[in-house]
Image (spheres, rainbow, N blue to C red):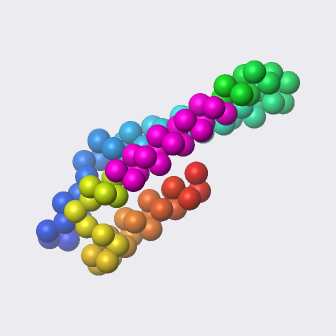
Amino acid sequence: MPPHGIITFSTWGVPFLNTIILVLSGFTVTWAHKAICISKFEQTRIALLLTIFLAIMFTNLQICEYIESSYNIGDGIYGSVFFMLTDFMVFTY
């Protein structure tokens, strides 16, 4: 439960969309790997381009989420944990 005065995002909005994008990018990068293994280089190119496109979409949505949040990293434990965990997702992408 967030502290009083902190307005959170709906979990069915941008966070859910970003989760779908992350799962889809896992599929596309696996597709690229399998295509490399069987020497289907055109499929590899398509899959990697899709993966890059999904990465750009994810990063842009994450930036929008950061800009629109009603709290920041200095707003106690809630803000600190939120930004730390979401930064881990962005930088491990």
Write down the quadrant of residue 19 in the picture. Answer: top left
Residue 27 falls inside the magenta stretch: no
Residue 52 falls inside the magenta stretch: yes
61 lies left or right of 47? left
The magenta region covers: 48-64
Q: x, y percentage for residue 88?
A: 52, 62
Q: x, y percentage for residue 30?
A: 68, 35
What is the total number of numbered labels drawn onto the structure image?
A: 0
Query: Is residue 9 positioned above or below 73 on the image?
Result: above
Residue at the image position 44 percent from the left and 59 percent from the top: 86
Q: x, y percentage for residue 33?
A: 75, 34
Q: Quadrant of the N terminus?
A: bottom left
- For residue 28, say whether it is visible: no
Report the front residue among 52 and 26: 52
Q: x, y percentage for residue 16?
A: 37, 42
Magenta highlight: main SS = helix
Query: Is residue 3 positioned above or below 37 on the image?
Result: below
Residue at the image position 39 percent from the left and 53 percent from the top: 63
Query: Is residue 78 positioned above or below 31 on the image?
Result: below
Residue at the image position 38 percent from the left and 39 percent from the top: 17
> Furthest-left residue in view?
5
39 lies left or right of 23? right
Residue at the image position 19 percent from the left and 66 percent from the top: 6
Report the front residue among 12 and 36: 36
- For residue 29, say whether it is visible: yes
